[in-house]
Image: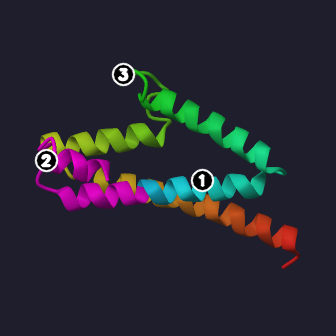
């Protein structure tokens, strides 16, 4: 929604590969949903899951450069999925460089699959399946 709004109202230029940016954003959404689902099954209570998820999201945002720019040479600069996404989107939009699209998508989907597997195993243990 933000991307559409920025494109139509502010006439933001999302480059020549808008469909790849959309697909990349979709993998990030899948990662976020899988992360939330995995956290809900790993924690014992709803409050614990919410707290753990919030701490991890805030740290990921901090290290990903959401609050202020992070030096690219810092060892922790690439620990966050947010920084992978930002780097890849900047390369697509400004440099027309598609080299990091597939690795970023695979990383997002791979981590999402890991959290989904955690959720499946935890659910099977709780439900006795």
Q: Main secondary structure of the magenta part?
A: helix
Q: Nearer the viewer, residue 19 or 45?
A: 45
The residue labelled by disc 1 is 35
- The residue sitting at 31% across, 39% down in the picture is 87
Residue 69, numbered label: 3
Q: Position of residue 14 (x, y in %)?
A: 17, 48
Mark 3 surroundings within 10 Å by alpha-carbon count, few (fewer than 14), some (14 through 19), many (20 or more): few
**In this rendering, does residue 112 appear at all?**
yes
Query: Of helix, strand and loop, which one carries label 1?
Result: helix
Query: Of helix, strand and loop, which one carries label 3?
Result: loop
Q: Nearer the viewer, mark 2 or mark 3?
A: 3
- Give the CA distance from mark 2 to mark 1: 30 Å
- Give the CA distance from mark 2 to mark 3: 22 Å
State whether residue 59 is above or below residue 71.
below
Mark sitting earlier along the chain (1/3): 1
Mark sitting earlier along the chain (2/3): 3
| Image coloring type | rainbow
Q: Nearer the viewer, mark 2 or mark 1?
A: 1
- Give the CA distance from mark 1 to mark 3: 25 Å
**In this rendering, does residue 14 appear at all?**
no
Magenta residues?
A: 1-27
The residue labelled by disc 2 is 96
State whether residue 107 is above or below residue 79.
below
- The residue sitting at 57% across, 32% down in the picture is 58
The quadrant of the image that shows the C terminus is: bottom right
**Total label count?**
3
């Amino acid at each position: 929604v933000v991307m559409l709004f920025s494109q139509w109202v502010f006439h933001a230029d999302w480059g020549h590969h808008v469909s790849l940016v959309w697909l990349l954003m979709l993998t990030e959404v899948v990662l976020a949903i899988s992360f939330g689902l995995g956290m809900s099954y790993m924690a014992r209570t709803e409050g614990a899951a919410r707290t753990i998820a919030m701490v991890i999201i805030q740290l990921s945002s901090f290290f990903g450069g959401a609050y202020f720019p992070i030096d690219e040479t810092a060892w922790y600069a690439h620990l966050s999925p947010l920084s992978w996404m930002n780097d890849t989107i900047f390369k697509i939009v400004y440099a027309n460089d598609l080299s990091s699209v597939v690795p970023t998508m695979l990383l997002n989907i791979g981590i999402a699959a890991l959290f989904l597997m955690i959720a499946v195993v935890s659910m099977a243990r709780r439900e006795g399946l």
